[in-house]
Image: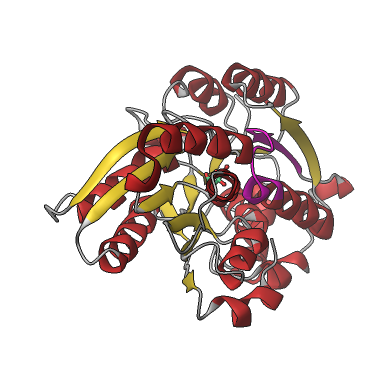
């Protein structure tokens, strides 16, 4: 049975070293994460792919933070293939990494491989997306956003902007993924309460610009000017939808309300340009918290099962001020 060989050593450094997950990355980055004998911590990171600017920012955040802390990172980009993610985790286990960061593509399908990680005593930290497992001891913690709340904020904006009356189309995220499921739920929690609001079409754009554009083209073909608002589960889809609306000879942000989630520079710029109406922030810069969590759990600390990011929203009025500070 593998044990954390340096656990006692890490525990000696105690709170001064890791201080829990509330610490900023900068504070924590001054810690020395090497093991006794000068051996560096080794962490595996299984990433879904690079479908959106948000995800590219998450990958950069993890890679930069590992480098800052002197942690050896084994990175695998599964290119949207969940079986590839499972394979990557098995390979991390075989390489006896100290911990695993996992950004899971969908909610389902993780139980067997996470049981293997648990049997090998390798802690698994979920990055940004949740999973559906019968035994939540299969992962240490989930670091990410409240996707239901994000959907509710988007729904409230659309309900207010349409004054409770109008036709909405919904471009969903990847089918079966936590953000697609939860952002739909949160949005419908709000708009379904208003009898004058109808979601007339809904389809997945796979969290990509190309997907968002294609889906919006089909929606416009089917409903044209009947559409009063477009709700996109992420910014890349909204940028694609904006292209489709423009190419159809309509003005996004004016003829149709456009709302999305993430808070990327490009979407905040679209607000400034008057092509989008509302953006709900979702923070991808999770590297510092991810490694804080790893160092804490390896030092024997117990973490909360979910660590939720604090996030804001942007409209056309607040966007210009926010734009220069956007980091992704
Ligand atoms: O899981 C977070 C979502 O995944 C982001 O909103 C989206 O842009 C990404 O691809």
Instruction: Pick whichever, 213 or 174, lies toward us.
Output: 213
Q: How is the image coloured?
A: secondary structure
Q: Is residue 52 magenta?
A: yes
Q: Name, please, the residue furthest toward the front.
A: 249
Picture quadrant of residue 138: top left
| Image height of 130 relative to 65, above or below | above
- Residue 131 x, y percent position in the rendering: 42, 34
27 lies left or right of 247: right
Q: Can you see residue 31?
A: yes
Magenta stretch: give its range: 42-56
92 lies left or right of 296: right
Instruction: Pick whichever, 124 or 77, lies toward us.
Output: 77
Residue shown at the point (62%, 21%) measured from the top left: 81
Q: Quadrant of the C terminus?
A: bottom right
| Image height of 193 relative to 214, above or below | below
Q: Is residue 266 magenta?
A: no
Q: Quadrant of the N terminus?
A: top right
Instruction: Pick whichever, 9 or 66, lies toward us.
Output: 66
| Image height of 321 relative to 160, above or below | below
- Residue 158 x, y percent position in the rendering: 32, 61
Residue shown at the point (78%, 52%) measured from the top left: 66
Instruction: Pick whichever, 216 or 246, lies toward us.
Output: 246
Q: Can you see residue 178?
A: no
Residue shown at the point (72%, 31%) measured from the top left: 77
- Answer with the quadrant where ligand 1 appears in the image: top right
- Residue 184 x, y percent position in the rendering: 33, 43
Q: Name, please, the residue furthest toward the right.
A: 38
Residue shown at the point (64%, 45%) measured from the top left: 55
- Residue 153 x, y percent position in the rendering: 34, 62
């Amino acid at each position: 049975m593998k044990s954390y060989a340096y656990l006692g050593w890490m525990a000696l450094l105690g709170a001064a070293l890791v201080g829990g997950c509330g610490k900023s990355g900068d504070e924590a980055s001054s810690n020395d994460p090497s093991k006794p004998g000068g051996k560096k911590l080794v962490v595996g990171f299984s990433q879904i792919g690079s479908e959106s600017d948000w995800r590219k920012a998450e990958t950069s955040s993890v890679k930069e933070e590992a480098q800052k802390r002197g942690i050896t990172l084994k990175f695998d980009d599964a290119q949207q293939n969940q079986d590839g993610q499972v394979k990557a985790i098995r390979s991390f286990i075989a390489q006896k990494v100290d911990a695993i960061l996992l950004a899971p593509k969908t909610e389902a399908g993780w139980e067997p491989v996470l049981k293997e990680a648990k049997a090998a005593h390798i802690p698994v930290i979920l990055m940004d997306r949740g999973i559906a497992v019968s035994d939540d001891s299969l992962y240490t913690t989930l670091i990410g956003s409240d996707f239901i709340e994000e959907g509710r904020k988007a729904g409230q904006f659309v309900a207010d902007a349409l004054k409770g009356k109008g036709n909405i189309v919904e471009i969903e995220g990847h089918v079966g993924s936590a953000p697609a499921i939860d952002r739909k739920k949160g949005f419908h929690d709000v708009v379904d309460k208003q009898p004058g609001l109808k979601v007339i079409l809904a389809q997945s754009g796979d969290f990509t610009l190309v997907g968002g554009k294609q889906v919006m083209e089909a929606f416009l073909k089917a409903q044209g000017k009947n559409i009063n608002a477009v709700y996109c589960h992420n910014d890349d889809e909204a940028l694609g939808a904006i292209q489709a609306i423009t190419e159809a000879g309509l003005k996004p942000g004016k003829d149709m309300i456009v709302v999305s989630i993430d808070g990327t520079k490009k979407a905040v710029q679209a607000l400034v340009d008057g092509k989008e109406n509302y953006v709900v922030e979702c923070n991808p810069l999770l590297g510092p918290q991810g490694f804080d969590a790893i160092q804490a759990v390896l030092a024997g600390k117990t973490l909360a099962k979910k660590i939720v990011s604090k996030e804001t929203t942007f409209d056309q009025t607040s966007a210009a001020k926010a734009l220069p500070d956007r980091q992704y």
